[in-house]
Amino acid sequence: GENVEQHPSTLSVQEGDSAVIKCTYSDSASNYFPWYKQELGKRPQLIIDIRSNVGEKKDQRIAVTLNKTAKHFSLHITETQPEDSAVYFCAASGGTSYGKLTFGQGTILTVHP
Amino acid sequence: EAGVAQSPRYKIIEKRQSVAFWCNPISGHATLYWYQQILGQGPKLLIQFQNNGVVDDSQLPKDRFSAERLKGVDSTLKIQPAKLEDSAVYLCASSSSSGSYEQYFGPGTRLTVT
């Protein structure tokens, strides 16, 4: 089945800096890659996603890039703010596990004011 | 649009007891998922329903876990008997169909087994 590795496990930045979180996946047939933000005690919330026919997608301060050949994708947050502090999860879906999301281990992002 | 509803929000039981969780997906969403999220880890899929049929239950510990979605709308997940390692947050999610990848999560049920 699909396996998703996520790095780093923790990331600490100063307000205004950029943050980058990277994920690799194993199933070359996967074709959907969402990113979720989870604040303490709350539900995961979809913040951005990308499909395999697109290399990059941006939404204000958030962007995701996908390299299908290398089987990795990354989340980029620019001009970070304290309210960006949360746990971020990448996931992969499609291929042999249609609809099922396989999540990475999560990255604890802390933005210091 | 109302979101995914789950109850109860918290549950504490002793090992070997049984427990049940309930989920009501977003109206019209045909696909429903149950995930287990152990503290410090990403969610792990337990079971996926398409309407009232099971699509994937490969990671469901069937000796103690069961789930049903009888009328293709709400769903229940049961654990019997519970073990200490079942302590986790149980998240329900739904999507509009198998062809739509976007999944919307409920608030989860935090289970503590003592």
Image (spheres, coloured by chain):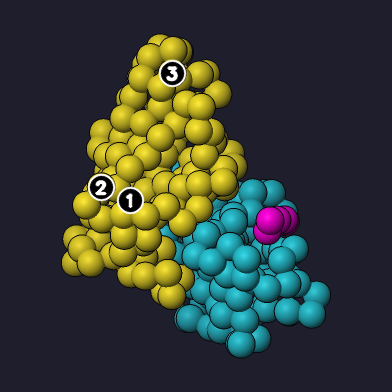
Marks 1 and 3 in Cβ contact (< 8 Å)? no
Badge 3: chain ID: B
- Front residue of A15 and B76: B76
Q: Label 1 sits on what residue type?
A: Gly
Q: Which residue is mark 3?
A: B81
Chain A: drawing colour: cyan
| 1 and 3 marks on the same chain | yes
Residue B106 image label: 1
Nearer to us of marks 2 and 1 is 2
Examine the image and state in which quarter residue A29 appears. bottom right
Q: Which residue is mark 2?
A: B70
Mark found first going from the N terminus, 1 or 3: 3
Residue B98 higher or lower than B33, as above or below: below
Q: Secondary structure at mark 2?
A: loop
Q: Residue at x 58, y 69 (%)?
A: A94
Residue A100 higher or lower than B11, as above or below: below
Q: Which region of the structure is painted magenta?
A: A1-7
Does residue A90 appear to the left or right of B13 in the view shown? right
Q: Position of residue A113 (x, y in %)?
A: 53, 56
Does residue A54 appear in the picture of this structure? Answer: yes
Residue B105 higher or lower than B18, as above or below: below
Badge 2: chain ID: B
Q: Residue at x 38, y 14 (%)?
A: B17
Crowd class of label 1 (few under 14; some 14 to 19; many from 20; radius 10 Å): many
Q: Tell me the yellow chain.
A: B
